Image (cartoon, grey):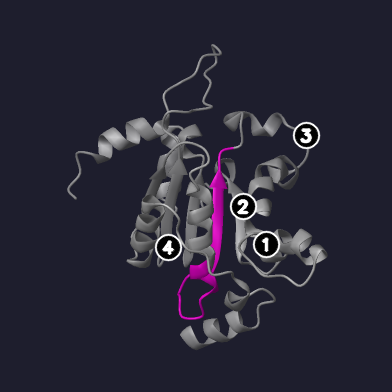
């Protein structure tokens, strides 16, 4: 129930009162903050360094830590390159995905107030352990429906059309989705060793024909 969720959020080790009050800097960032508050799903694209992922993650965390919000967890979704060959890398999913989570470990350090350096070092892991943040690769999404969450699809230019379709069909009740990426840049490589068209381009061309 709603009351149970409110009380659960109030008992979290890291809560909404620990968040810094971060304001948008650029006009585009202001648009992101405003659109998110209106409940819109977002597609953020731009070159590296424009703050796409940072702004997306901050708004998502602010949302899921809000006791009045129905959303409870941020799901960061990425394609682990080389995307379809993750099974050949040593270790389990956690080992394979660790390096891809380093940017988010660094980002959250600027988003929260913490008492000491050790707490900052453990911040990302603590957010994961308390169920506020989860990291998923596209390889492990089949058969999952995500309710009451915010999905951030980061570096989405590296996804093929099938992966994008899989992610979009995972969205359940009370879940918002944010795509973040740079259409001009893709890490998709085909079997011949050349770069392939991002699934975003195909997805965008199909969605352009849909009613607004």
Q: Is residue 91 above or below residue 32?
A: above
* SS state under label 2: strand
Mark 3 crowd level (few <14, some 14–19, many ≥20, 10 Å Cα)? few
Q: Is residue 84 above or below residue 93?
A: above
Q: Identify the residue position indicated by label 1 in the image.
A: 128
Kindly identify the residue that appears in the image at 45 percent across and 75 percent down: 69
Q: Estimate the spatial distance between the alpha carbons at disc 4 and disc 2, rounded to whole Å.
A: 16 Å
Name, please, the residue furthest toward the right.
118
Q: Identify the residue position indicated by label 2 in the image.
A: 135
Q: Identify the residue position indicated by label 3 in the image.
A: 90
Residue 1 seen in the figure: no
* SS state under label 1: helix
Mark 1 and mark 3 lie on one chain; the one further toward the N terminus is: 3
Q: Identify the residue position indicated by label 4 in the image.
A: 175
Are the residues tagged 1 and 2 within 8 Å (C-beta)? Answer: yes
Mark 2 crowd level (few <14, some 14–19, many ≥20, 10 Å Cα)? some
Q: Is residue 181 above or below residue 194?
A: below
Camera-near label (4 vs 3) is 4
Mark 4 and mark 3 lie on one chain; the one further toward the N terminus is: 3
* SS state under label 3: loop
**Residue 82: horizontal and vertical position, in percent?**
61, 28
Q: Estimate the spatial distance between the alpha carbons at disc 1 and disc 4, rounded to whole Å.
A: 18 Å
Q: Estimate the spatial distance between the alpha carbons at disc 1 and disc 3, rounded to whole Å.
A: 23 Å
């Amino acid at each position: 129930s709603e009351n149970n969720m409110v009380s659960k959020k109030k008992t979290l080790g890291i809560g909404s009162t620990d968040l810094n009050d971060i304001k948008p800097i650029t006009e585009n960032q202001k648009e992101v903050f405003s659109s998110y508050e209106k409940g819109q799903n977002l597609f953020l694209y731009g070159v590296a360094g424009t703050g796409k992922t940072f702004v997306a993650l901050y708004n998502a965390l602010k949302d899921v830590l809000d006791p009045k919000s129905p959303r409870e967890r941020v799901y960061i979704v990425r394609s682990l390159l080389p995307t379809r060959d993750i099974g050949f890398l040593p270790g389990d999913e956690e080992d394979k995905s660790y390096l891809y989570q380093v940017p988010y470990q660094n980002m959250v350090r600027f988003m929260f107030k913490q008492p000491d350096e050790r707490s900052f070092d453990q911040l990302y892991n603590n957010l994961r352990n308390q169920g506020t943040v989860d990291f998923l690769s596209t390889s492990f999404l089949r058969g999952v429906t995500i309710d009451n969450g915010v999905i951030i699809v980061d570096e989405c230019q590296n996804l093929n059309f099938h992966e994008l379709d899989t992610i979009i069909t995972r969205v359940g009740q009370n879940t918002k989705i944010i795509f973040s990426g740079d259409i001009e840049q893709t890490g998709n490589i085909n079997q011949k060793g050349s770069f392939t068209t991002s699934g975003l381009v195909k997805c965008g061309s199909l969605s352009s024909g849909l009613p607004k």
